């Protein structure tokens, strides 16, 4: 399961699900609680791995980790060029809480940063996060990467949020196949791509 984690009530959270050789998309509605939407979806699908596009830890300084002196960034953020978990504030707190809630239900949650995979797949040269026609180009390019035996609801990718959810799902698939790139360290927090 790949999740593009948006504002809590904005209706921008999107989920990509891989199940029974099919990839399809779920969208949170405006004014619907995105945290509950993700939580209930995870309980329903019980994924082997849920990859979330949000920080899942704070800089190690706050945990007293040796060698961690940065108040704003984790090693993973610096290596990946990601935003500070501190800058994202409430979103980070919501993501950590969701991870802890799902852990209680034996659903593992991992942090990902879809832009890393977008760069790796050269989507930036095709207008990643640009206009609507760029979205159609990028979604076509991503869908062509899948094994033809996997059915993808390409028409379900109606926004960049859905495309980022697909990128998060692809990172989860790489992880399950032991092909992930890992940024940061386990004690402080890692980003998987």
Image (cartoon, grey):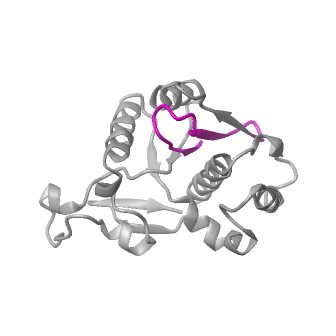
**Residue at 35% across, 47% down:** 92
As for residue 176 lying within the magenta part, the answer is: no
Q: Is residue 68 above or below residue 22?
A: below
Pick the quarter of the image with the C terminus: bottom right
Residue 67 horizontal side relative to residue 193, left or right:
left
In the depicted structure, whether residue 75 falls above or below residue 137: below
Question: Residue at the location (20% across, 69% down)?
Answer: 70
Instruction: Look at the image and say whether residue 19 sits in the magenta stretch.
Output: yes
Residue depicted at x 44% and y 72%: 81
Residue 77 x %, y %: 37, 67
Which corner quadrant of the image does residue 155 belong to? top right
Position of residue 183 in the picture relative to residue 22 (left or right): left
42 vs 152, left or right, is left
Number of dots carrying numbers: 0
The residue at the point 70 percent across, 37 percent down is: 25
Name the residue furthest front. 131
Q: Position of residue 50 (x, y in %)?
A: 52, 43
Task: Give the quarter of the image for residue 30.
Answer: top right
Stretch of the chain drawn in magenta: 1-23
Q: Nearer the viewer, residue 144 or 115?
A: 115
Does the rendering let one see residue 152? no
The image shows residue 186, relative to residue 165, as above or below, that is below
Residue 23, x across and y down, in percent: 74, 42
Can residue 91 be seen by looking at this rendering?
yes
Q: Residue furthest right?
A: 148
Task: Look at the image and tell me in which quarter the N terminus lies.
Answer: top right
Task: Give the image location of residue 82, x and y in percent.
Answer: 43, 66
């Amino acid at each position: 399961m790949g999740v593009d984690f948006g504002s809590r009530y904005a209706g921008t959270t999107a989920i990509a699900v891989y199940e029974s050789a099919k990839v399809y998309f779920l969208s949170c509605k405006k004014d619907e609680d995105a945290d509950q939407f993700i939580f209930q979806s995870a309980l329903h699908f019980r994924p082997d791995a849920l990859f979330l596009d949000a920080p899942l830890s704070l800089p190690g300084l706050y945990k007293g980790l040796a060698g961690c002196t940065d108040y704003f960034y984790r090693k993973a953020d610096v290596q990946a060029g990601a935003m500070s978990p501190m800058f994202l504030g409430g979103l980070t707190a919501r993501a950590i809480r969701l991870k802890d809630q799902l852990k209680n239900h034996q659903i593992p949650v991992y942090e990902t940063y879809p832009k890393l995979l977008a760069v790796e797949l050269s989507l930036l040269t095709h207008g990643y996060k640009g206009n609507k026609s760029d979205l159609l180009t990028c979604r076509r390019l991503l869908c062509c990467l899948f094994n033809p035996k996997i059915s993808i609801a390409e028409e379900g990718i109606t926004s960049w949020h859905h495309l980022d959810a697909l990128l998060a799902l692809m990172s989860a698939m790489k992880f399950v196949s032991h092909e992930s790139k890992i940024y940061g360290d386990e004690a402080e927090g890692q980003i998987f791509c």
